[in-house]
């Protein structure tokens, strides 16, 4: 178990492609941290630099207080679990799990004890004599994790380990990995492009884009107080709705003028946004912070958006309705599934103004409601 620290770490590939840019990240001992972002954001490159599979261009990486920039992967005392499992097809499960210990010349009795202990933790004792081709995807994943566990490393590194599993099995394995971390209490760095996976697994999540850390913090903090528009749109399913407009002043309050409708912001929000009056801005509101008129969740007459329903997706107790206005063709609201509505109907959406966000224009426009929001790592 160990603290993992990245200081001003950058990676530039041949041709000048900068995959990671001046990354500072302090991963605490026994912490489960998740690097999340779209393809090409630099998360897997970061993981490979920690593992020693990629040389860093600039900066410093330390594991357990030891700088490992020039330490080969085999001597970093980490264990990595890959997306494709990387099991030896000609070996049994037992031999796959024991292989790394055998190379390090551990005594046979200790190898056997470690393999069987790991198999018990993962509930794969009955699979030890099988070969990988006789296993399901979930069983192969457990074996790959077991091969890492027997090493008793300072840190586990996971590179999109669940992406080859079906949806039901991914959910089951997420719970298994969470339980495993509670049991072993080993520092864990996990890479995924699936923000739902990140939210459910991580003690903290690190949202990345174009090689830069956009925000780092506990999942709910990132969800509730996104540092910028990119984070707000990436974290959450369905994603946050965004409206282009302008901030205007009216009677001491700040209004968001969308063009076809004006929304009066709360007193606290008006105080935070007073310096931005007259500027263009983007208002963000999550689907669950919108309700159909009559649901009684958010009342009032000044926070109403007239829309037309285009698609209805039932989800059990709730349903997602995809709606539009003349200037915004894609607005999603998550509402009570028992409401009697139909496609093509014109309805009114009430917004919970206590939960809206206001961003500067641009893909990574800062959240004006939380200018001191946690983007630190």
Image (cartoon, grey):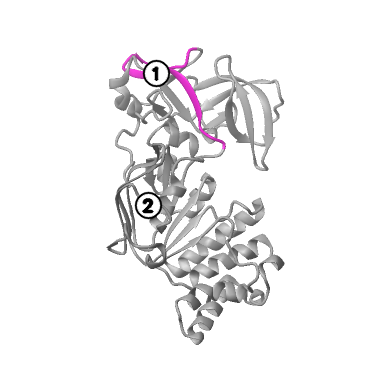
Q: Residue 292 location, x and y as percent? A: 59, 28
**Residue 249: in magenta span:** yes
In the picture, measured across the screen, residue 305 lies left or right of residue 222, that is right
Q: CA distance from mark 2 to mark 1?
A: 51 Å
Magenta highlight range? 238-259
Q: Main secondary structure of the magenta part?
A: strand
The picture quadrant where one finds residue 112 is: bottom right
Q: Which residue is mark 1?
A: 255
Q: Is residue 277 left or right of residue 188?
A: left
Residue 221 position, x and y percent, is 40, 44
Give the residue displayed 53% in from the left and 69% down from the top: 147
Is 47 or 179 nearer to us in this picture?
Answer: 47
Quadrant of residue 92 in the image?
bottom right
Q: Which of the pair 335/21 is nearer the observer?
A: 21
290 vs 91: above or below? above
Q: Quadrant of the N terminus?
A: bottom left
Mark 2 closeness class: few <14, some 14–19, many ≥20 residues within 10 Å? some
Q: Which residue is mark 2?
A: 55
- Is 126 displayed left or right of 26 in the figure? right
């Amino acid at each position: 178990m160990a603290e993992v620290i990245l200081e001003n770490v950058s990676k530039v590939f041949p041709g000048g492609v900068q995959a990671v840019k001046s990354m500072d990240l302090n991963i605490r001992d026994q912490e489960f941290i998740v690097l999340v972002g779209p393809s090409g954001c630099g998360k897997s490159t970061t993981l490979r630099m920690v593992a020693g599979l990629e040389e860093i261009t600039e900066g410093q990486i330390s594991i357990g207080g030891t700088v490992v920039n020039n330490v080969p992967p085999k001597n970093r005392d980490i264990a990595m679990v890959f997306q494709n499992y990387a099991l030896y097809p000609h070996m049994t499960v037992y031999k796959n799990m024991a292989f790394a210990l055998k190379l390090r010349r551990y005594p046979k009795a200790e190898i056997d004890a470690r393999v069987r202990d790991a198999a018990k933790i993962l509930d794969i004792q009955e699979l030890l004599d099988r070969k990988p081709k006789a296993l399901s995807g979930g069983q192969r994943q457990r074996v790959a994790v077991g091969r890492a566990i027997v090493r008793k490393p300072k840190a586990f590194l996971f590179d999109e380990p669940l992406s080859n599993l079906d949806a039901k099995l991914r959910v089951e394995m997420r719970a298994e990995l969470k339980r495993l971390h509670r049991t072993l209490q080993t520092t864990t760095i996990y890479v995924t492009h699936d923000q739902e996976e990140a939210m459910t697994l991580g003690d903290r999540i690190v949202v990345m884009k174009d090689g830069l850390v956009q925000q780092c913090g506990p999942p709910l903090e990132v969800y509730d107080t996104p540092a910028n528009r990119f984070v707000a749109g990436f974290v959450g399913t369905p994603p946050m709705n965004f409206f282009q407009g302008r901030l205007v002043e009216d009677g001491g309050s700040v209004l968001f003028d969308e063009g076809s409708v004006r929304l009066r912001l709360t007193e606290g929000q008006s105080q935070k946004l007073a310096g931005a009056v007259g500027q263009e801005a983007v208002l963000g509101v999550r689907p669950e912070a919108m309700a159909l008129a009559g649901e009684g969740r958010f009342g009032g007459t000044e926070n109403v958006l007239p829309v037309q329903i285009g698609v209805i997706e039932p989800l059990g107790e709730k349903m997602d309705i995809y709606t539009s206005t003349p200037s915004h063709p894609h607005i999603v609201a998550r509402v009570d599934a028992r409401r009697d509505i139909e496609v093509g109907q014109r309805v009114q959406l009430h917004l919970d103004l206590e939960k809206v966000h206001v961003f500067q224009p641009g893909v990574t426009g800062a959240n004006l409601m939380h200018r001191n929001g946690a983007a630190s790592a």
